[in-house]
Image (cartoon, grey):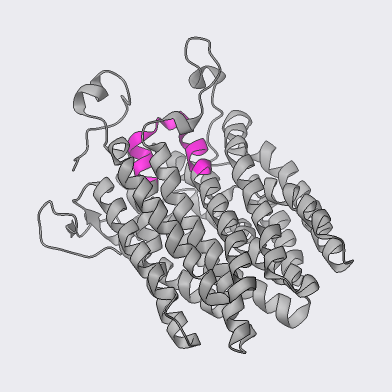
Amino acid sequence: MPTSGPRGDGPGSASAPPEGAGYRRLLSTPGVRAFLVSGFAARQPFAMLTVSMVLLVDHVTGSYGTAGAAAAVTGASMALFAPRGGRLADRYGQRKVLLPGITLHAVSVAAVALLALSDAPAWALLIAAVPTGATVPQIGPMVRSRWIVALGGGGSPLGATAAAFESVTDELTFVIGPVLATALCTSVHPAAGLIAEGTLTVVGGSLFAMQQRCAPPLSSPSTATDAGRAPRSALSNRGMPALVVAFLGIGTVFGGMQVSVAAFVQETGHPGLNGVLYGTFAAGNMLSGIVCGTLKWRSAPRSRLLAALCGLTAACALLWLARTVPALGLFAFVVGMFIAPTIVTGYSLVDTLVPQERRTESFTWMTGAVALGQAAAVTSAGVLTDAAGSRCGFLVPMAGTAAALSAVVALRKGLRPQTPDEVTKGVISHRQPVPVD
């Protein structure tokens, strides 16, 4: 988590932002409130989908392993299709990609609910989960692209504040979404969470697509090619492999906790507290994100990313120690406080390392990595929970973050910003040199 420190260049050093560079000025930017409100509604499906699917499939099959597999296929499908969706949005416009996508998503969600309630075999649920995940609207990356337009480019002094604000917004959905999904599934009907998710996708996505004021301009095919060759993936940019690995680790925290927390409250006789506990985790994430947006860091982003991943790994180790609901709530809150610094720093590094014409696709690679890590963790935690209980399920976030930390340490050289000589050679000519560690 971010901490204020003395003036200097150490890894914990930060200072107050310059006057007028905070959230108030950010939100007064012309045109942003329209896409923020509709975008917030359209983000809820990402926070509700896997929770709703786990609760529904577990209800009808009695197996966390089957529920985790269905959620995993959904997440893996989203991870595979999200970058292509980001590229299409850059090429043809967000509206043309969103409108057919949200329609297909609503139909796919309805199919999953009907199959589950009709006691369809597990293989049928897994097949239906593929289009469900593939059509999840990528609202977060689209909103981040709109911020760049609204702020007049990626070099705006409010860019870091916007990244922190987006992290807070994302995590606010994980405060509201799981609680809402759990309440609907446990108090109304097992399929009510999925039905609400599909409805919010259509309504929120349609409203967001209609907001065109800050929509990014269409990219020219020539901007993504080099000497007539096929467009390169944003993943080929310097530092992106390390960032994707880091976000895979974050995904294992989300996925492992979704299954393990649900199993824990069942074991302790408090099933209705599932959404509350997961919301506590998201609340810690949101609060630390707010702090990140109020500080101007003096340390290099690479150092902050490594420090945040170290803290996240240590915090995840606490989950295995929980024996009561209050203890799990406290540990989940601590884990959440290390998520936002990792996410905010990761997105800030994209602005440093990736050319502007590939940023939307880069953002979707990162959100896709979260979904893929979540999918793997949901499956692993489901199998372990069925076999040995929720405590073993909590080992998944710890193992996932430890593996991600090890990989990022090995790839850390790619996270070094370009030198002034490289900038003048046109590698990323639109950027100013930044401090390196």
Magenta: predominant secondary structure element?
helix
Quarter of the image that includes the C terminus = top left
Please state the horizontal and vertical placement of residue 255, each as a whole percent of the image.
Answer: 55, 62
Please state the horizontal and vertical placement of residue 200, each as a whole percent of the image.
Answer: 69, 61
Q: Would you place residue 374 above or below residue 159 in this image?
A: below
Please state the horizontal and vertical placement of residue 251, each as a whole percent of the image.
Answer: 50, 56
* Residue drawn at point x = 52 percent, y = 52 percent: 370
In the depicted view, which residue is nearer to us: 314 or 181? 314
Quadrant of residue 63 within the rendered picture:
bottom right
* Residue drawn at point x = 37 percent, y = 46 percent: 407
Q: Residue furthest top?
A: 227
Left or right placement of residue 370 versus residue 338 in this view: right
Left or right placement of residue 432 versus residue 161 in this view: left
Residue 220 in sight from this viewpoint = yes
* Residue drawn at point x = 27 percent, y = 46 percent: 302
Counting labels gives 0
Quarter of the image that includes the N terminus = bottom left
Residue 287 in sight from this viewpoint = no
Left or right placement of residue 170 versus residue 153 in this view: right
Quadrant of residue 50 within the rendered picture:
bottom right
In the depicted view, which residue is nearer to us: 124 or 364? 124
Q: Residue furthest right?
A: 118
Please state the horizontal and vertical placement of residue 290, each as a whole percent of the image.
Answer: 36, 64
The boundaries of the magenta stretch are 347-365
**Residue 351 within the segment the image draws in magenta:** yes
**Residue 261 within the segment the image draws in magenta:** no
Q: Would you place residue 338 above or below residue 237 in this image?
A: below
In the depicted view, which residue is nearer to us: 432 or 20? 432
